[in-house]
Amino acid sequence: MIEAIFIITLLGMSLGLLLGAASSFFAVEGNPLEAEIEAMLPGSQCGQCGYPGCSPAAAAIANGQADITLCPPGGRSLAQQLAEKLGVSADLSGMEDKEPMIAKIREDLCIGCTKCFKRCPTDAIVGGPKMIHAVISDACTGCEKCFDVCPTECIGMHPLPKTLQNWYWPKPAIAA
Amino acid sequence: MGFADFKLFKIRGGVHPAENKHATAGHPITPVPLADRLFIPLQQHIGAPAEPIVKRGDKVCKGQLLANSQGMISAPVHAPTSGTVIAIGKYPAPHPSGLPVRTIIIEPDGNECWADVTLPYSDPLTLDPDEIATRVAAAGIVGMGGATFPSAVKLNLRKRYKLQQLVINAAECEPYLTCDDQLMREHASEIMQGIAIMMHALQVPEAIVAIEANKPKAIKAMREAARHLSAIKVVSVPVQYPMGSEKHLVQTLTGKETPARALTADIGIVVHNVATAHAVQQCLYHGRPLIDRVVTVTGGAVKNPGNYLTPIGTPVSMLFEIAGGFNEEPSRIIGGGPMMGQPLPDTKVPIVKGSGGILALTAQETAQKTAMPCIRCGSCVTACPCGLLPLEMANRARANDLDGSVKFGLMDCIACGSCAYVCPSHIPLVQYFNFAKGALAEKQRAQHKQEEIRRLTEFRNQRMEAQKQAKRKAMAKRKAEMAAKKAREAEEKSAEAGA
Amino acid sequence: MSASPISGPYTHENSSIRKTMLWVMLALTPATAFGIYQFGLPALWLFVITIAACLLAEAASLYVAGKPIKAYLSDGSAILTGWLLAMTLPPWAPWWIGVVGALLAIVVGKQVFGGIGQNLFNPAMVARVALLISFPLEMTTWNAPHPLFSAGTPNLLDSLRITFDLQTHYDAMSSATILGHVKTELSRGIGLSQIFADSFNPLKLGIGSVSGSLGETSAVLIFAGGLLLLFTRIISWHIPFSMLFAIALLASVFNLIDPERYPPAMYHLLSGATFLGVFFIATDLVTSPVTKAGQLVFGLMCGALVFVIRTWAGYPEGMAFAVMLMNGVTPMIDHYIRPRIYGRTRKGDPISYDEPAEAKND
């Protein structure tokens, strides 16, 4: 019995040493993952994720500090892509409720102060000084930067309207 | 003409639902009187919606152009009768979502006075094929089997594909519907004229009219009409759903499968519905645009089912009125047949170019039960005419694994409903597939939008950079000027002091 | 219009899970009735107890899972599982064999996987195999037929005593099945010609007046039930035919090689659970492949396994093990054997009708 204990201990120790040596031999330098993740993020630097821009957010995701569901404009499709990239399983349940929102300007309240269009990261707002502004909904990411600065609070966030072009059958309710 | 010895091929799978055509088969086509208001959607076709050229208050004549087609894949819209345009705005579409569509609302004046339809030629077969396609396009003719694809675009396929045959789809494989059947019985010679025009437009040497074997009178009438036309064969095809699917019809007639993601034109065949052929004849021989169609109004809940010649834009409620109303509260109101038809949100929605049938079904007829879990019986696999695995596609769709669903053949699914028809657990398989297809399209739109946003953001950043640079340059220039000016002033001062 | 629209198709074939189950039960009825007649009242009690236990187990599992009990119980699948399980038990087995079997079949074999349609293995076979391994004595104690209304049949009180495992004078009357007998004798080195001389009677085997499990013995009645299922399209011919073919082929080949050691095909086909397994157990919808080609492969391999286990493995009857092993392979069969999609080649690329680059000129 003593022999058995001795042999197994020796085996365990030698294998452990081998693994330790391998982990330092084959360690991966740097993190090319970060650049790849940054390319996947929208790049509009809206800050909704809590990081001061898409690069820091990408770094945080690559280090595992941030959750892959952190980007609201990217939505579920981005979270799924990130999940695939990082090889983790995505818990997207929290993302279900947030619909993509589009900013809309109430023209009767707009004073033409230009504060909003200067902040829009995609130039989705058109208008000039002292002229009424309007949002091009196709270009709007819903980052809410304009919504935050409008002095007359004439910008509202609305969900994307359902039209005949983008309606589709909902998933059938699961029976029992 | 050799119809008796035409070799047919088998199609895989398929189902045999009860035909239920006895209620309306043989019912002569009855014209429907004008409703108080006609609602003409600007989108009754695949492609871009038409753009109105009339405005509120305009008086229009029957057959007058109301809206122009927009772009390559589009169709114009014409007035079904004379009257006044009382509104152009949103009205519920004959679509399961109940969402509105831009609609022109006309109040008929009852005079039915036609717009000018005189033709500058006597024989359409002497026209250039391009001219035929132009006229068909201008008449707003779209696929009347329900797909509503602009027919002129299909007629011009001869420019991009080597075509050998025109197939006229008169299968009418959906239960309940008899509109094409009756049209053939009553207007066979006109249909033949339309077919001849289409053959000329496509520049093909022969045409085959495929009629399911459960329409013997229609077959007889069409063969009679084709007696002296050697290039047009009338063939009786087996009664099997989905024989009316163009890919499967072509396989039955030629044994060739249309390659995936391709058109039947890739194997030299163009398919048109028989009612479309009739519409083409009306356009080329009489100058009439597409302003009415035969609609089968039937179902267990309808008192007097029949085939009704209906002006486009007639509300469905009016059709039910003409058909005697309901003898019991219908469980479902469907536009189209029971297999692939769409539920109508309301009876105030109008008849459009693709409405071949309006069904008011009782609960007994729909036989819908609560869905149970899948028992992997494989009936759906046996029934699928496309060789897919519906149970696996639905499982993946339920788990939101859209790519998995695609791997099992989602994009090859024709949504015929054969699988859901046979499923003993009554699982709404087609709804799973429609959901998955829609979610995929939404994902693609979202991805496209993200790419665009990245492009716009980069562009904006570049613009800001450029602005900054310009500012800096201007600042530097001003600084330099200021410095130079100061230097000059200092010089002058010292020069003055020195003098 | 806030409610979600209801999707088509708006017509349906006259089919449902319950109808399928009812047809299968109808197909089993003649053989079951005959079996109860052959083995008397204890067989009836065991049959009833097994089915009742299955229903209770299912109801309890559904309750725990929070599913609607009435809807799922009324589809008949629990009853059918109990019925099939009872058919494979020794007819005079004590009541607790039926109850434990029912629990194993329903809870472990079906509900734990997620309920109907989710199980990987045939529930009745899971139970049978588990019982066989756990209680080998009770599961291999066979007895000779004591037909109802005959002199030797137990009366009501005795039959209850037998089922509820109390002392009766019937205890000592056990008898081996033909499969068991043949295997034992072969292992003792006795040739088949001698074994069969006094005990192989194909007619008796076919009709079923031999010992065996309840309902397994009358090959003729089971076969008739199987034909009914084929005729009503509840099952397709692929699995039964390929299984029978595989068994018959292997049996005939080996019988030709050495007639003394390997029984002929007829013996294999008529004895034991062959027809029951081929028509009712291997064709279980949930655990068999969904494509016809897959079903053929499944049947062939299953039949081969039955032969192999019967001939060379430790147990005289190989059907339950063969079916369970193949159930495990079914997902792989379903993964690799798929129909060819319309418009595509077998590999999945769109088909092309390109003309060959140059025409041959002669």
Image (cartoon, coloured by chain):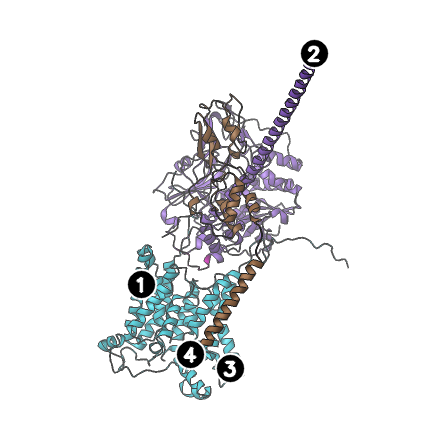
Q: Which chain is purple?
A: B
Q: CA distance from mark 3 to mark 1?
A: 45 Å
Instruction: Report the chain holding disc 3.
Output: C
Label 3, on which residue? C255
Return the disc, 3 or 4, that comes first in the chain's sequence.
3
Q: Colour of chain A?
A: brown
Q: Is residue C305 visible?
A: yes
Label 2, on which residue? B496
Q: Colour of chain C?
A: cyan
Bounds of the magenta segment: B373-379
Callout 4 and callout 1 share a chain: yes
Label 4, on which residue? C316
Instruction: Report the chain holding disc 1.
Output: C
Query: Are dots 3 and 1 in contact, CB under 8 Å?
Result: no
Disc 2 versus disc 1: nearer the observer: 2
Give the farthest residue toward the front: B498
Query: Are dots 2 and 3 in contact, CB under 8 Å?
Result: no
Instruction: Report the chain holding disc 2.
Output: B
Badge 3: how crowded within 10 Å, few (<14), some, or many (20+)? Answer: some
Disc 4 versus disc 2: nearer the observer: 2
Residue B140 % position (x, y): 56, 34
Q: CA distance from mark 2 to mark 3?
A: 134 Å
Give the amino acid at mark 2.
Glu
